[in-house]
Amino acid sequence: MIVRKKQSLFWSTIAAIVALTLLVTLSKLFLNDQGKKQIYVFLPSIENPFWLDVRDGVAREAAQLGDAFDVKIVTTASTDGSDQIDQMSTAIARGRVDGIVLAPTNDRAPAPVVARLNKRGIKVVLIDTDLNADTAKQVGATWDAFIGSDNRLGGEMAARVILDALKDAKGSKSVLLLKGNYVHQSAVDRAEGFVRAASPEMRVIERSAEWSRQTANELTASQFSREPVNAIFASNDDMALGAVSALKKLNIPPEKWPVVVGFDATKDAQTAIREGAMHGSIRQQSSKMGASGLRKAADLVQGAASSSSTEKTLVPVDVVTKLNLP
């Protein structure tokens, strides 16, 4: 009888210890999870090489932040802004969000959601594309910081690269400008910067290729069926590579190819530059942009002071040609 009581007391004690240990462990896990700062990163594309580099930068920075943060990267394949708005709204509805890093697929559509984030005190960092100022003002949307490339300067640099490459060409010169989607301020800035620097010396033929390789291919083929041009500037490398594909299909001798310059200096573009199909590309520090955006958001949600106006940081751009390929 005494033995049974001792055994019963022993197993009761063990059960109590196990239960207490489990309770402490679960409590720690719960508290740790509750204590983490929640940051969402919304990116526009799961395929574009530029955005893959941005994502890599975010992921590396997230690893550096450690266990104090829970970073979720969300991407969309839609370019009209609707999917991104749904994704942002879902994140808000699920519960705690301390900060977001947003690369808008559309410079107007996300403004009402950003205004909702403002009301909840959620820190907002924009990367690559600013929200349209008028639309944001109408709905009361503000953001704490913007980190992007100097796209206008990049467009000007592209024009100077082309003008230098054509300095010995005789007669009047023309250039086909393949523009990005104008719902992105980056597309506007690149095109305007290019036109400002190129138009005094070249006739600029502007066409909207919507960031699409296939559309750029078709527009280039159509242009050369009517009138050849001396150069092509595409506002991203996908469109530049679409133009290259069209030139190849047209069986134009390499010595008669136009000077082709893109924007982003992606790996595929660097290969085309190395092979001589492209003359150059404007390089953004895309990985750094992603890392800097997340770091800024982390600092803000931890209580770093922010100025009364939006803090704006422009990441430098430079030119990649065959002479300085990485």
Image: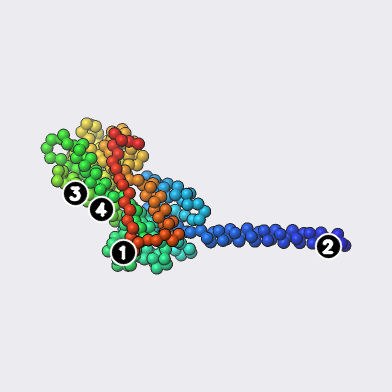
- Residue type at the position of mark 4: Val
Q: Which residue position is annotated with label 2?
A: 5
Residue at coordinates 44% horizontally, 61% vertically from top-left?
303
User: In the visual, does 297 lie left or right of 272?
Assistant: right
User: Looking at the rendering, in which quadrant would you find the N terminus?
Assistant: bottom right
The part of the image, by quadrant, that contains residue 321 is: top left
Q: Earlier in the sequence, mark 1 or mark 2?
A: 2
Marks 2/3: CA–CA distance: 93 Å
Marks 1/4: CA–CA distance: 18 Å
Q: Earlier in the sequence, mark 3 or mark 4?
A: 4
Is any atom of residue 220 visible in this view? no
**At numbered mark 4, what does the secondary structure look like: helix, strand or loop?**
helix
Q: Which residue position is annotated with label 3?
A: 196
**At numbered mark 3, what does the secondary structure look like: helix, strand or loop?**
helix
Label 2: few (<14), some or many (≥20) within 10 Å? Answer: few
User: Looking at the rendering, in which quadrant would you find the C terminus?
Assistant: top left
**At numbered mark 1, what does the secondary structure look like: helix, strand or loop?**
helix
Marks 4/2: CA–CA distance: 83 Å
Marks 3/4: CA–CA distance: 12 Å
Q: Nearer the viewer, mark 3 or mark 4?
A: 3
Residue at coordinates 81% horizontally, 59% vertically from top-left?
7
The part of the image, by quadrant, that contains residue 230 is: top left
CB under 8 Å between discs 3 and 4: no
Residue at the extreme right of the image, as rendered: 1
Marks 3/1: CA–CA distance: 27 Å
CB under 8 Å between discs 2 and 3: no
Q: Earlier in the sequence, mark 4 or mark 2?
A: 2
Q: Residue 193: give x, y in percent of width and height.
A: 22, 49
Instruction: Name the disc covering residue 188, or none.
Output: 4
CB under 8 Å between discs 3 and 1: no
